[in-house]
């Protein structure tokens, strides 16, 4: 699979009917491609690219180029592509096979179309980018067809500057329609405004803005359409560049300060169909730093998805630092404790700000469709997650030097005993400041949150309300009905010194001990325990008042005892 790159480009995105001597953007379109021809459904088992001349004039394609991100092939012969006609481009070895479908031009050195994602760029002899697409497997909108043998087809040829929303898998019984009108041809206008989806700080003077679709370079070139907070003001210059039109380089008049978070806001910037940017026009920027141990933590994990579902891992920045994600790697662990081959977390820069979440999965669309609390902008695609077995496993977050940033040894027994079925239910971290390896600091996501909160605050998170106190409970009234609201009674403790041993037991109002929550363990100076309303046999206790009795003692004989009352209010 081809690596993603940050590419900055400039274009006035519009379709022009003018009959001039020079070529114009979108005169000729890339309307179909077959990145993964095997297993064949009915087409030749070879890649192809389909072009259509959508202008009102003919073009000689001599010395035009077709490219991917890594290589480029030049058309070395005269070929007159007439107005309103198709042309199939393919490798020389498959020219005869594709000639049965329509006009075909074999190209020596035909650039490979990568299966999972890739770029196709059509350039004229003068170097003008006529059309370019950056596809990935999600464009198929059909997992079966994405596995090979089916082409990708453009839906509405009057909207060539849209990406994923205007492409889908072919409906043809042959798996594609090379040389013919697309099987998915339909009216599919773009009525959605462009959204600012990322901002990457290159250095103190330069920012790159990334949009979810191409932008109109005329509106994007107006400097007064940009503003940066905290006295930075308008930029010095902005620059949009071919071939994909969805990124803008911003050069500032004044430098950003290290460690400070700014806001960049945009107005009156349009996409190539004239839709003006709306609410998604503000993004945080700041100079990023490398992550240190404990800055970034594992915050949520789905390791037992339903059939045909996908695992995911969520990270949370609990530090006050702006973190550079290109310096982070994920790895599993072998049974002997050695690390498996680490994989880069991102292939293009992404910044993780304090208090932000990022979720990684092999299929973001599946996660978004199946978890109603999912935040699309915080979910990124990762080609391959570390192996996450359904029972237990280990996953490690590393920096570029191999230093461990965080490590999670999860176990499916961390799920709530109230849970009838673990399939499709994520494990959520309760408190960010407690150890990652602490089982009592993890529990099942609430049913009301759809059993997962990808890219968002955990449904079962807790604040440390015991700060400055010896022991306290939160909340005093809880209802273990798994609805995401006060499902647990959290017992917080803050001790004046290290070395305490502790026992915490639960009694009913008759004085009968119903649960031995903690039995004579060495305690940290502060921490949290969780009671889920179950007795020692894991049976759900009846509604009523319960007494939490804590006995903490030092080896020298000093003892601290405390009783607190909580109410188990409602159960299913």
Image (cartoon, rainbow, N blue to C red):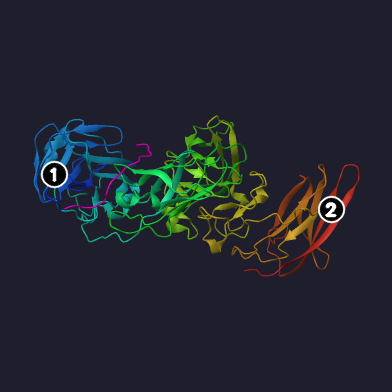
Asked if one can make out residue 83 in the rendered structure from this viewpoint, the answer is yes
**Which residue position holds label 2?**
551
Could you tell me residue 457's position as x and y percent? Answer: 57, 55
- Left or right: where 198 falls relative to 415: left
Asked if one can make out residue 302 in the rendered structure from this viewpoint, the answer is no
On-image quarter of the C terminus = bottom right
Q: Residue at x 21, y 30 (%)?
A: 109
Q: Secondary structure at mark 1?
A: strand
User: Depth check: 374 or 83 in front?
Assistant: 83
Instruction: Estimate how packed mark 1 is, as few (under 14), some (14 to 19) or many (20 or more) residues with alpha carbons within 10 Å.
Output: many
**155 up-or-down from 404: above or below:** below
Per the model, the C-alpha gap separating discs 2 and 1 is 82 Å
Q: Nearer the viewer, mark 2 or mark 1?
A: 1
Q: Which one is earlier in the sequence, the residue at label 2 or at label 1?
A: 1
**Which residue position holds label 1?**
87
Instruction: Estimate how packed mark 2 is, as few (under 14), some (14 to 19) or many (20 or more) residues with alpha carbons within 10 Å.
Output: some
Q: Is residue 405 magenta?
A: no
- Left or right: where 118 falls relative to 421: left
Image quarter for residue 517? bottom right
Could you tell me residue 506's position as x and y percent? Answer: 78, 60
State which region is magenta: 1-16
On-image quarter of the N terminus = top left
Q: Secondary structure at mark 2?
A: strand
Could you tell me what secondary structure mostly forms the magenta stretch?
A: loop
């Amino acid at each position: 699979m081809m690596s993603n790159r940050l590419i900055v480009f400039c274009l006035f995105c519009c379709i022009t009917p003018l009959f001039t001597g020079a070529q114009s953007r979108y005169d000729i379109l890339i309307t179909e491609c077959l990145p993964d021809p095997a297993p064949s459904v009915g087409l030749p088992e070879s890649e192809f690219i389909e072009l259509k001349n959508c202008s009102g004039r003919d073009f000689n394609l001599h010395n035009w180029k077709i490219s991917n991100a890594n290589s480029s092939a030049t058309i070395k012969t005269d070929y007159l592509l007439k107005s309103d006609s198709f042309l199939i481009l393919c490798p020389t070895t498959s020219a005869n096979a594709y000639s049965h479908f329509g006009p075909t031009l074999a190209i020596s050195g035909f650039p490979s179309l990568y299966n999972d994602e890739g770029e196709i760029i059509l350039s004229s002899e003068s170097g003008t980018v006529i059309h370019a697409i950056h596809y990935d497997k999600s464009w198929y909108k059909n997992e079966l067809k994405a596995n090979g043998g089916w082409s990708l087809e453009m839906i509405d040829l009057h909207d060539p500057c849209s990406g994923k929303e205007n492409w889908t898998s072919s409906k043809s019984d042959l798996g594609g329609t090379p040389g013919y009108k697309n099987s998915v041809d339909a009216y599919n206008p773009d009525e959605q405004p462009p959204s600012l989806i990322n901002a990457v700080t290159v250095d103190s003077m330069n920012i790159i803005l990334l949009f979810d679709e191409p932008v109109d370079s005329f509106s994007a070139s107006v400097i007064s359409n940009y503003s940066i907070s905290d006295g930075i003001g308008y930029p010095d210059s902005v620059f949009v560049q071919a071939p994909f039109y969805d990124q803008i380089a911003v050069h500032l008049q004044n430098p950003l300060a290290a460690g400070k978070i700014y806001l960049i806001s945009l107005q009156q910037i349009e996409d190539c169909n004239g839709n003006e940017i709306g609410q998604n026009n503000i993004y945080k920027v700041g100079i990023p730093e490398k992550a240190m141990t404990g800055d970034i933590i594992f915050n949520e994990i789905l390791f037992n998805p339903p059939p045909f579902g996908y695992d995911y891992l969520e990270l949370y920045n609990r530090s006050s630092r702006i973190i550079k994600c290109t310096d982070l790697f994920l790895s599993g662990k072998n049974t002997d404790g050695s690390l498996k081959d680490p994989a880069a977390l991102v292939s293009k820069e992404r910044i993780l700000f304090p208090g932000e979440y990022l979720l990684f999965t092999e299929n973001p669309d599946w996660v978004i469709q199946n978890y109603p609390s999912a935040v699309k902008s915080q979910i990124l695609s990762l080609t391959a997650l570390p192996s996450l077995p359904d029972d237990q496993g280990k996953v490690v977050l590393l920096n570029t030097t191999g230093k461990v940033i965080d490590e999670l040894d999860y176990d499916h027994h961390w799920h709530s005993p109230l849970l009838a079925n673990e399939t499709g239910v994520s494990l959520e971290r309760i408190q960010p400041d407690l150890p990652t390896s602490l089982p009592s600091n993890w529990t099942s996501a609430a049913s009301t949150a759809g059993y997962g909160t990808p890219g968002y605050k955990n449904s079962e998170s807790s604040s440390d309300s015991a700060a400055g106190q010896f022991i306290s409970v939160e909340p005093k009234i809880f209802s273990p009905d798994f609805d995401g609201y006060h499902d647990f009674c959290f017992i917080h403790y803050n001790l004046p010194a290290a070395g305490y041993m502790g026992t915490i037991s639960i009694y009913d109002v008759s004085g009968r001990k119903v649960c031995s929550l903690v039995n004579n363990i060495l305690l940290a100076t502060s921490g949290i325990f969780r009671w889920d309303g179950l007795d020692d046999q894991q049976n759900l206790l009846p509604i009523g008042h319960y007494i939490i009795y804590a006995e903490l003692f030092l080896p020298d004989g000093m003892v601290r005892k405390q009783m607190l009352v909580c109410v188990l209010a409602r159960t299913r």
